[in-house]
Image: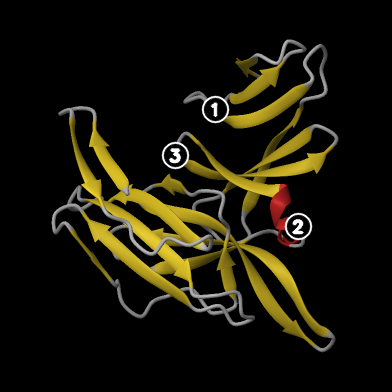
Amino acid sequence: MAVIWNPAIRKFVAVSVRNLTFRTVLGFGVCRETADPKIVKITCKDDREDVESVVEVFTLSSRAWRNPGTNLPRKTIKLGLFGSQVVDGCLYWLATDRITTDGGFSFSNIIISFDMTSEEFREVNLPDDLSRLRGTKLSLSKVRESLVVVEDVGHGVEAIWMMDDGVSKSFTKLFTVNFNTPPAQVRRFRGFRKTGEPIIEVVQHNLHGQLVVY
C-alpha cells in the first residue's frame, strides 16, 4: 500500500501496490505538463544474468496501473534498491550494468532516468572513476534542482559530484566533506539545504542523533 498525500488541500489517496518483492523499486513524481502525480514500479523477475524488468506506472487521474510501453531498461541493467531522486521532471536511480568480457563479465555503475512526461527511460553514464566503484560506495541526492552523486571515499570522507545539465559522464566534483571531527562518534550524510549546504546526522556519545549543517 502506498499513500499519495497533498498537504496543501489535506487530502490523500491510498494506492494498492501488489506483488512487491525484494527486487521491486518504486519512485514518485509529477508530470510537468499535466501536474498528474505518478508512481513508477519496476520489478526484476528474478536474479538471472539477463534480468528482465517489469515496469508499471500508476497515474492519479486514472486511478489505475498500466505498462508504459516497450522503452524498458536493458536486460543487463539492475536498478539499486536505495531510493530515487526527482530532478526537473525526471526520476533517477543508481544501477549496475553487467558487461560481458573475454574473461567473463564485469559490472559498471550507471544512472537510469525516467521522464515523468514522456515516460521514457534514459541511461546516464558516470565518469570512469565512479563507474568502477562498488555500488554501495555511491548514493544519489540533489542540490537545489541538480542531481548529485555522493561518493563514500572511506575513513569518514565523502565527495559530492554534480551532474552537468543531464550530460552523460559530465560531472563536476563540488567539494569533499570530512566527517572525522570530534567529539561525535557516528556521522551520516542526510542531504542538502536549499542553499546547498550539506546536512549531516551526528551521533554523540549519549547515542542521541542531531542534524547539523556542515
| Residue pictured at 41% horizontal, 73% vertical | 54
Q: Nearer the viewer, mark 1 or mark 2?
A: 2
Q: Residues within 10 Å of mark 2 (few under 14, many from 20)?
A: few
Report which residue position mark 1 lands on: 196
Q: Amino acid at mark 3?
A: Glu
Q: Earlier in the sequence, mark 3 or mark 1?
A: 3
The quarter of the picture where residue 208 lies is top right
Image coordinates of residue 178 in percent, x first then y, are: 78, 27
Q: CA distance from mark 3 to mark 1?
A: 10 Å
Q: Nearer the viewer, mark 3 or mark 2?
A: 2
Report which residue position mark 2 lands on: 134
Q: Is 44 displayed left or right of 137 in the figure?
A: left
Image coordinates of residue 100 in percent, x first then y, are: 72, 84
Q: Amino acid at mark 1?
A: Gly
The quarter of the picture where residue 98 lies is bottom right
Q: Earlier in the sequence, mark 3 or mark 2?
A: 2
Q: Is residue 147 above or below residue 95?
A: above
Q: Is residue 35 above or below residue 123?
A: above
- The secondary element bearing badge 3 is classed as loop
| Residue pictured at 14% horizontal, 59% vertical | 62
Image coordinates of residue 160 in percent, x first then y, are: 67, 39
Q: Is 136 displayed left or right of 197 in the figure?
A: right
Q: Amino acid at mark 2?
A: Arg
Image coloring type: secondary structure
Q: Along the line of sight, which residue is nearer the eye, 200 or 2?
A: 2
Q: Along the line of sight, which residue is nearer the eye, 129 or 171?
A: 129
Report which residue position mark 3 lands on: 145
| Quadrant of image for the C terminus | top right
- The secondary element bearing badge 2 is classed as loop
